Image: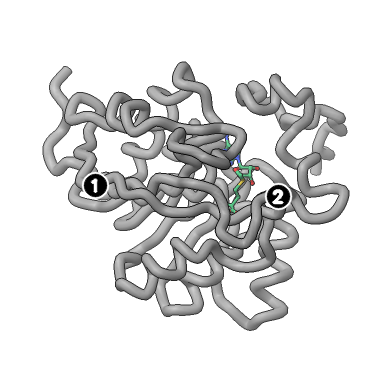
């Protein structure tokens, strides 16, 4: 059997994202020396509240799942969930967390810009803290990738830092940026953008201002 070629490419052959180019480090490196700034050791309260409202129906994808705290929370309520990330170290932690807690959830390495390569579709998609790491120039490819795996009529939830201070996070997003990215032309309808909070290890107990966007995948194909 041919051996896998040895590689020291921290990006595993994919182009680095804008965040990785800016920091000079792969996403995986964020998980090497203790908890990452966003790793609060449990699910985000906004996601717990959403889950309690019963919105995670059908098959669920958690894009950019990190150590899988949100994935595992949703899975613990009985939904079949796949968490994907480019950071292998985070995925190893997620799998270990799942095993340690006896929660059934699936984790896989996948690039959020090429979710179609999963060869699966999902009824509900969660993006907790991923969209806000991308620059506007990356939005069209990410939005198209999300569209490729979201069932018509399915729902995408995005929790991201908002640009409405005080105490905004490092990648503040405007409502306009969300509404520019997700349009009928790209196959989506924004049904709501509500103020919320994102908790991190570097904000106080109230967290940082956030948007919780609810976005529906249109049933008809976008015009060409
Ligand atoms: C700010 S963290 C949020 C992690 C997790 N959702 C949470 O709430 O704790 C962003 C995550 O997205 C992942 N990520 C960044 N770019 C990605 C890409 N192109 N494809 C898949 N995952 C990506 C990072 O590795 C990181 O785990």
What residue is drawn where x is 81% and y is 38%?
4
In-image side of 206 versus 89 (left or right): left
- Position of residue 82 relative to residue 132, above or below, is below
Nearer to me, 62 or 221: 62
Residue that lies at the very extreme toward the front in this rendered image: 166
The number of numbered badges drawn on the structure is 2
- Position of residue 62 relative to residue 138, above or below, is below
User: Residue 155: image x %, image y %?
Assistant: 28, 52
* Residue 192 marker: 1
User: Residue 40: image x %, image y %?
Assistant: 67, 61
Disc 1 from disc 2: Cα separation: 28 Å
In-image side of 28 versus 192 (left or right): right
User: Residue 189: image x %, image y %?
Assistant: 20, 39
Quadrant for ligand 1 reads: top right
Mark with earlier residue (1, 2): 1
* Residue 202 marker: 2
**Could you say whether the residue bearing mark 2 is in a helix, strand or loop?**
loop
**Could you say whether the residue bearing mark 1 is in a helix, strand or loop?**
strand
What residue is drawn where x is 62% and y is 25%?
17
Q: Quadrant of the N terminus?
A: top right
């Amino acid at each position: 059997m041919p051996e896998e070629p040895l590689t020291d490419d921290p990006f595993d052959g994919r182009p680095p994202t804008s965040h990785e180019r800016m920091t000079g480090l792969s996403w995986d490196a964020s998980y090497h020396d203790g908890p990452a700034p966003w790793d609060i050791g449990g699910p985000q309260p906004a996601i717990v509240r959403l889950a309690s409202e019963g919105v995670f129906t059908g098959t669920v994808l958690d894009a950019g799942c990190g150590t899988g705290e949100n994935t595992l929370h949703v899975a613990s309520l009985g939904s079949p969930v796949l968490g994907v990330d480019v950071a292998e170290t985070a995925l190893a932690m997620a799998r270990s967390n799942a095993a340690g807690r006896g929660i059934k959830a699936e984790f896989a390495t996948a690039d959020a810009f090429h979710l179609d390569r999963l060869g699966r579709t999902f009824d509900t998609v969660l993006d907790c803290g991923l969209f806000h790491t991308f620059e506007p120039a990356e939005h069209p490819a990410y939005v198209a990738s999300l569209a490729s795996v979201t069932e018509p009529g399915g729902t995408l939830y995005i929790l991201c830092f908002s640009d409405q201070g005080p105490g905004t996070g490092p990648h503040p997003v405007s409502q306009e940026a969300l509404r520019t990215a997700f349009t009928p032309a790209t196959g989506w309808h924004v049904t709501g953008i509500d103020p919320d909070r994102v908790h991190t290890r570097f904000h106080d107990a109230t967290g940082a201002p956030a948007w919780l966007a609810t976005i529906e995948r249109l049933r008809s194909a976008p015009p060409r």
